[in-house]
Amino acid sequence: MNAILSKRGYTLTETVMVVVILGLCIGTIFSIAEVSSKIWSEGKIASELREDTRTALHLFTREIRESSLATIFLGPSTASSYNAISFGKAERNSTSGLIMLDSDNNIIWEKAIIYNTYNNPNAGTELRKSVLNWDSGLTDLQRQAQVDSYVNSSSGREIIKNLQTGGAGLLDFSAEEYDHWTETDFFNEGIVTDKVVVSGGNVFLDGGGETWFIGGQTGDDIPDNINDPSATGSSYRILISSDSLFKSGSRVRLKFVASPTGTGALNITRPALAETDSINFRNIVDAARSSLFFSSSASKTLAIGETAWTDWLSWETAVGEVFNKDKNYSITYYSDTGETSGNFCTRKWIDNTDPIETQEILWDGTDASIFPLDWGASGTAQTYLYAVEGIDVSYCSSGTLTSQIYNTGVDNPVYDTISWVETLPAGTDISIKVRSSDNADMSLATAWGSLIAFTDSSADNDISGIGTGRYVQFQAVLTSPSPFTQTPILSDVVVTWKGGIISITVDRYYNYRGRGYSISMTSDVKPKNK
């Protein structure tokens, strides 16, 4: 009996607590389910909006791309933002599918396609499409009037409903119809460079470093060493082939090296540099020589293993042009006794290429920098090159890149702006000129010297004054200040003109349980037919 009485059930409080907890759990489950359902529904709506909008945009871009800029008209003509567009659809061969051309190779247009928005009072804003037979007798003014008549028209077939309402966007054909030419790689056929180089899609001034090293010309990367205490004084001429020069520059200097072994020294006296008309030593005619110095001194004695650079020579000032990688040069110097009487301690490179083209000439015992010599008749041909290890140049003081001639594909384009990307170290500068012509070879175009140069890369420089020629071309001038140790860098030149690219924006709207959902997509379309 006591055992039975000792068994107890749940109290009322415990039962109420269990019911409350169960209620909370069930409520939480239903809340999660409701939120999940709402998220799923909203995701489904967003997906459908996105898919419908993408479908409509694809329809536009596909058809407009197959059209021609000359057939595209936007309405209303008095607006800056449009909601109607008309364009031609070409006739195609039923067998091959190719676009049909008339006897003058002009496209035969078959249909006029018109898209417009319609504010349906019962169904909201709709996108509609009309297909008309092409009337070749219509003028441009009549075609504009035709598309204007479809602004907010209920004509045509319904494409989509529930476009964005409230006047915000609707179906928008951008008023900013621009085509452009962007030059980014500068490797196109027709580009002409003068004292500039192109690398990695950027344009630099030529120069700025080593333009010649002796091993590159001779093919000998491990020179011998000459240590001859009994050598007498001699004059030397080294012929520098343009095939071994790879940079031009406004200033130039030479590098001399002494033997790293032995007990003597190397004396270099009155080094000079001259342009030559040939690199065949028997036929050379040297131009006037320009002297080089070592810390303003005409001579330099190099200790064992020592390297010495001459002072920088302003070749452009001395000769009237830059040290040019496309020309041949000769270096002359005299080596008399060094620190030890009669010493000649230098490095020697064996000519492994063509001795006729890379020859050094010696005139034993005579200082050629003082006494003019007939090198070709009296000199001694050698298969070695001595002492001069390298040539450095600065950057060129200025250089020019003339672009290819670009066909806009538009009759009488209205040019708008030119801009570019640049990097300008202190004192450097870039200026750009642009011109147009109706002739593919730019004949009758304004001469470069008569054009205004633009210097502000960050601005949309107004080029509306260059005329309305179908072909356009620019010229960039890069400059560096003395001592020409820096170069500006040019990239991404952009020329724009009105017409050519149509920007289309489709906005979609949907109301779900009192909440509005919208999506917007934009596409830039360039008709591929002229």
Image (spheres, helix red, strand yellow):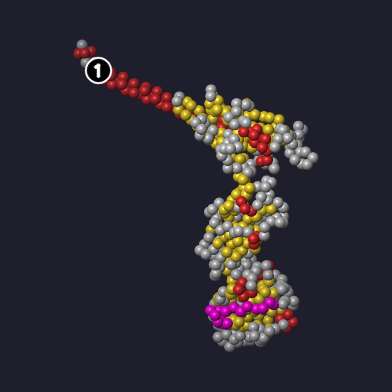
Q: Measuring from the top left, give residue 139's x and y in whole percent.
A: 70, 37
Q: Measuring from the top left, give residue 500's x and y in whole percent.
A: 64, 43
Q: Circle 1 is placed at which residue position?
A: 11
Q: Which residue lies furthest to the top in this view?
A: 1
Residue under the point 67% across and 47% down: 412
User: Front-most of 87 and 386?
Assistant: 87
Residue 6 vs 126, above or below: the answer is above
Q: What stretch is highlighted in magenta?
A: 286-301
Residue 71 left/right relative to 505: right
Residue under the point 67% across and 78% down: 288
Taking the magenta stretch, the answer to whether it contains residue 314 is no
Q: Measuring from the top left, give residue 283's x and y in whole percent.
A: 74, 76
User: Front-most of 448 and 358?
Assistant: 448
Q: Measuring from the top left, give residue 192's x and y in whole percent.
A: 67, 59
Q: Can you see residue 87?
A: no
Residue 392 vs 66, above or below: the answer is below
User: Front-most of 18 and 225?
Assistant: 18
User: Front-most of 197 and 476?
Assistant: 476
Q: Which residue lies furthest to the right in this view?
A: 103
Taking the magenta stretch, the answer to whether it contains residue 290 is yes
Residue 411 left/right relative to 339: right
Q: Say what amino acid the circle numbered 1 marks.
A: Thr
Instruction: Locate the C terminus by quadrant.
Output: top right
Residue 430 vs 333, above or below: the answer is above
Residue under the point 20% across and 11% down: 1
